[in-house]
Structures are given as structure tokens and as C-alpha cells.
């Protein structure tokens, strides 16, 4: 295995964990939780899900730029020589990270507080805002995956 293939594999796995986790949460877990759980239990579930999933997202947030810069230097000899699609992917990573940090730093503590205080209407409102941002982040992440797959030359 070459150094590039090792770094590339780690990069893909990090992206897969982040985007795939959002897809699972949005498309599978959310509908199941709505069907199977009452509001308070659903809010408690999401607090636990976010805490566990966000640990892995932080790994991806760190690993993606590190592995990306290494790949840039191994394959394209720097940012200047990278194709435009790579630069677009880097910009979308910044968008995804900003949305994630907003959820993690501002909204998750608000959700935790609402659940701890058993303020279910406030918790439901926060969860709705989190859901919207996760949905946006999922769409951005899927766009990054599509760009990586088709490698457009624009």
C-alpha cells in the first residue's frame, strides 16, 4: 500500500462516517423514532445519539483536512496546482464544519438543558432547528461526495 492510498482510504472513511451517519440519522433513525417513541423519549434518544455520533464527526473534522492537505502535497504539489473541484470540495468542507460547530456548540447544549429541565416544547423546537441544519449539512455532504465521484473539470 502506497502512502497516498493509505491517506486516501482514511480520507474516504472519514467522509463516509460523517455523511453516512447524517444520512442514517435523517432517513432511517428519525422516521423510526417518530413512529416508535413519544416526544420526551424521542428527545432523550436524540441527546444520546448526538453525543455518540458527534465524537466520530470530530474525528472526521480533524482527519479530513489533515489527510486532504497530505494528498494535495503528494498528488498535486500544493493548493495552487489542485483542480478546481478539489478547491470547491475544500470550501464545502468549511461550510459543513461551520454548520456542525453551530449545532454542537450552540444547539446541543440548548437541547440538553431542555431535556434535563423536562421542557419538552423547548426541546422539540431546538430539535427541529437541529434537524434543519443536519438536513442542509447532509445535502452539502452529498454534493461533496458527488463532486469527488465525478471530478468535474470547471
Image: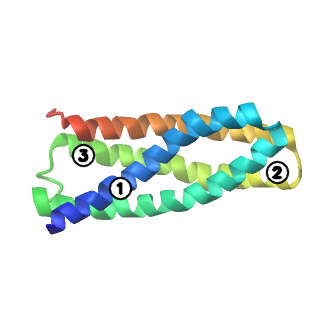
SS of the residue under disc 3: helix
Tell me which corner region of the image, top left, top right, bottom left or bottom right, holds residue 31. Answer: top right
Give x and y (percent) for residue 40.
83, 43
Q: Is residue 61 visible?
A: yes
Kindly check if marks 1 and 3 are in contact, taking CB atoms under 8 A apart as contact.
no
Q: Nearer the viewer, mark 1 or mark 3?
A: 1
Q: Residue at x 44, y 45 (%)?
A: 19
Q: From the image, tell me which residue sits under label 3.
A: 87
Residue 13, numbered label: 1
Q: Residue at x 31, y 61 (%)?
A: 10
Q: Is residue 133 visible?
A: no
Give x and y (percent) for residue 98.
49, 49
Residue 35 or 109: which is nearer the viewer?
35
Give x and y (percent) for residue 67.
28, 62
Give x and y (percent) for residue 37.
78, 38
Q: Nearer the viewer, mark 3 or mark 2?
A: 2
Q: Residue at x 64, y 58 (%)?
A: 51
Left or right: 63 in relation to 77: right
Amino acid at each position: 500500500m502506497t502512502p497516498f492510498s493509505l491517506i486516501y482510504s482514511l480520507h474516504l472513511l472519514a467522509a463516509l462516517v460523517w455523511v453516512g451517519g447524517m444520512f442514517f440519522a435523517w432517513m432511517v433513525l428519525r422516521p423510526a423514532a417518530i413512529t416508535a417513541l413519544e416526544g420526551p423519549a424521542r428527545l432523550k434518544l436524540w441527546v444520546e445519539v448526538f453525543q455518540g455520533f458527534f465524537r466520530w464527526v470530530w474525528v472526521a473534522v480533524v482527519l479530513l483536512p489533515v489527510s486532504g492537505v497530505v494528498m494535495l502535497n503528494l498528488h498535486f504539489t500544493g493548493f495552487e496546482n489542485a483542480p478546481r473541484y478539489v478547491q470547491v470540495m475544500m470550501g464545502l468542507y468549511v461550510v459543513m464544519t461551520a454548520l456542525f460547530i453551530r449545532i454542537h456548540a450552540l444547539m446541543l447544549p440548548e437541547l440538553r438543558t431542555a431535556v434535563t429541565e423536562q421542557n419538552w416544547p423547548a426541546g422539540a423546537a431546538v430539535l427541529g432547528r437541529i434537524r434543519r441544519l443536519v438536513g442542509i449539512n447532509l445535502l452539502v455532504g452529498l454534493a461533496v461526495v458527488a463532486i469527488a465521484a465525478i471530478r468535474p473539470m470547471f
